[in-house]
Amino acid sequence: MDVVGIVAEYNPFHAGHAYHIAGTRRRLGECAVVAVMSGNFVQRGDFAILSKYARAEMALLGGADLVLELPAPWSAAGAERFAQGGVAVLAATGVVTCLAFGSESGSLEPLEVAAAALDSPQYHQAVRRLTGGGAPFAAVRQEAIRSLTGSAADCLSHPNDILAVEYLRALRRTDIQPMALP
C-alpha cells in the first residue's frame, strides 16, 4: 500500500482539502494519507484561524490518516523553506512514497522544467543580469526562468504551482515521488 504525504496548513480545513485527499485516493487506490500541517503559525508568520488541534481533528475527519506538525520555522517561512520542511518531515517517517500536491496546471512536466532551471547555474547568472531595474524579485525570478525555459516560467505566476516547483526541488534529495493534482 502506498503512503502518500500532503503538506498543508488547513487554515481551516475546507471542502477543497477534502477533495484533494479524495482525489489522491481516487488516483492511487488504497493508500494511507499522512498530512504534515502547520501548527499555530502559518506561512508568512500569520496566526492560524483555529488551533492546531482543531485543524488536525478536521483533517482526520476529512480523510487524513495521520497528521504531523510542521515546525514553526518552516511553517512560517516562504514557499521554498515551507516545502523543504514539509518534505523533510515526510522523508523522516521512512514510509512516505509519494507527495500529492495541488497545482493550477496539474501537469508535472512544466513544473519539473522550472524546478530544474531554478537549480541551474544559468538561473543565477540570469538573475544577476536582470536585477537592478527595480522589478520585484518574483518578477525577476520569473523572467530569469523564462529566459532559460520559455513557457515553463508561466507556472511561476500561480501560487499552487510556485509551491509545487519548490516541492519538486526539495524532493530531489529523497526517494519520494511527486504527484500533481489539478
Image (cartoon, helix red, strand yellow):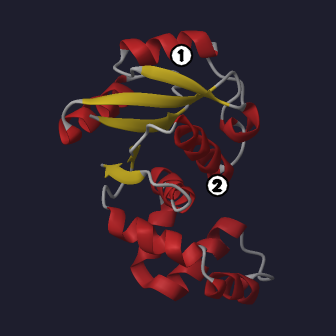
- Rendered-image quadrant of the N terminus: top left
Q: Residues within 10 Å of mark 2 (few under 14, many from 20)?
A: some
Q: Is residue 103 above or below residue 127?
A: above
Q: Amino acid at mark 2?
A: Glu
Q: Toward the viewer: 110 or 99?
A: 99
Q: Is residue 13 above or below residue 178?
A: above
Judged from the image, the secondary structure of the residue bearing numbered disc 2 is helix
Residue 13 appears in the rendering: no
Q: Which mark is residue 55?
A: 1
Q: Amino acid at mark 1?
A: Arg
Q: Residues within 10 Å of mark 1 (few under 14, many from 20)?
A: many
Q: Residue at x 51, y 65 (%)?
A: 156
Q: Are marks 1 and 2 in contact (CB under 8 Å)?
A: no
Judged from the image, the secondary structure of the residue bearing numbered disc 1 is helix
Please provide percent x and percent y for residue 55. 53, 16
Q: Is residue 48 above or below residue 142?
A: above
Residue 15 relative to residue 44: left or right = left
Residue bearing the label numbered 2: 80
Q: Residue at x 45, y 56 (%)?
A: 161
Please provide percent x and percent y for residue 168. 49, 59
**Among the two numbered marks 1 and 2 on one chain, the one whose residue lies closer to the N terminus:** 1
Q: Which mark is residue 175?
A: none
